[in-house]
Amino acid sequence: MPGFEAAVGLSVLSSSLNVLISIPSSRARTASSLAKVSSGLSAHESWVVRAVLVIRVVALRTLDPTISASAGCRVSPASVGRGVAVALSPFEGVPSGLCLDVVPGNAGAEPKLFNPNGYTVTALQAAWAGITSTDEGDGSPTHLQRGLQAAVKAGDDTDTVAAIAGALLGARYGASAVPVRWRRQVHGWPGLRARDLVSLGVLTSTGGHPSSRFPMAPTMADGYEQECAVPHPYDPDVLMGTFADLFRTRELGVDAVVSLCRLGVDDAKVDGVAPCDHVEVWLVDLEDPGANQHLDFVLDDAAAAVAMFRSEGKRVLLHCVAAHHRTPSVALRYAEPLGVDRQEAASAIQSALGSPIGGLLWKAARHG
């Protein structure tokens, strides 16, 4: 699951990255060939090979000062993101010393040193400087935020640099590392929002074939979900609910939704709730410790989404499929900033939902 999520994260965060390289003479033919080979490789089976090919294309650009940005030789966003992510040493499972000269001397440097950064190599250097200068070495997904902020603050061609940095950080940390407050603001032409980019990322990582029904099915509901929608014991304007409650938002007086499970295309169109007031959280309800790449971060981030909506005076539906694990786990994390003892809150939430709660997510919420 983390590897799949990383592929989705890379696809989402590199969605605006479009690297075009034109190389004259024999180097042009070499780079064009390498780029074409790289773009045809399997998404899951050839990351190391793709790394070598893509880095060699960029290396050719470094060696030849006559190379300029144009439509001569295309390197896909996935190729650059996956290639550099595999080829550079701070990422896990990477052979040491592989093509480190692509970004000579800029690891940990101030990103502004590479202005103007609108060209292929300087953009890559600025992005890598933003990433490495903000890496605290603890593997925390918050590095994604720090790295992107540093890339943008470098100035000049900020969209290009941030797109490259986002592709690399997305590959490293996955889609769940993108905080809700950022995803809430993502929008683009023609009317696409964060969930649309996630859907495109899922389809990209699976070769265009949906995983089960997700993400292209009209609904992910099975029809067996029971209505619940009980008030949070410490905040009556937060309703702890199920998938069935997602279709009762007007009845419940809800004007914001935090979804903790996969939704279909039609499920995401919540009656009476604006798209910017509905966030979807990547939280997997499995007992496998590896199913959620950043479990504590995601639990806290989902709880922060509830708090964000409440600070705006909104009545919030917090739901998963059956309110057995995900909903109570996030509800518990939400109670802590309210000043409630965690164990006391755990007992109250179980009482409100009417049944004992167990499982990995609940344990993490209580003890993480």
Image: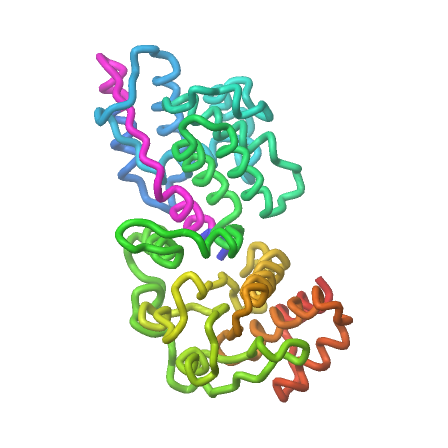
Position of residue 180 measured from the top left corner of the image (x, y, whole percent): 51, 56
Residue 315, above or below 28: below
Position of residue 267 measured from the top left corner of the image (x, y, whole percent): 36, 73
All told, the count of numbered labels is 0
Position of residue 197 measured from the top left corner of the image (x, y, whole percent): 36, 53
Here the colouring is rainbow
The residue closer to the viewer here, 154 or 51, is 154
Point 29% across, 24% down: residue: 21
- As drawn, the residue found furthest toward the front would be 313
Query: Is 280 on the left-hand or right-hand side of 361?
Result: left
Position of residue 231 measured from the top left corner of the image (x, y, whole percent): 59, 82
Point 61% across, 85% down: residue: 353
The residue closer to the viewer here, 90 or 306, is 306
Point 53% across, 25% down: residue: 111
Q: Is residue 129 magenta?
A: no
Residue 227, above or below 164: below
Picture quadrant of residue 83: top left
In magenta, the rendered stretch is 6-31
Query: Is 36 on the left-hand or right-hand side of 126?
Result: left
Point 63% across, 87% down: residue: 355
Please state, as top left, top right, bottom left or bottom right, where the C terminus lies in the image. bottom right
Picture quadrant of residue 78: top left
Residue 292, above or below 163: below
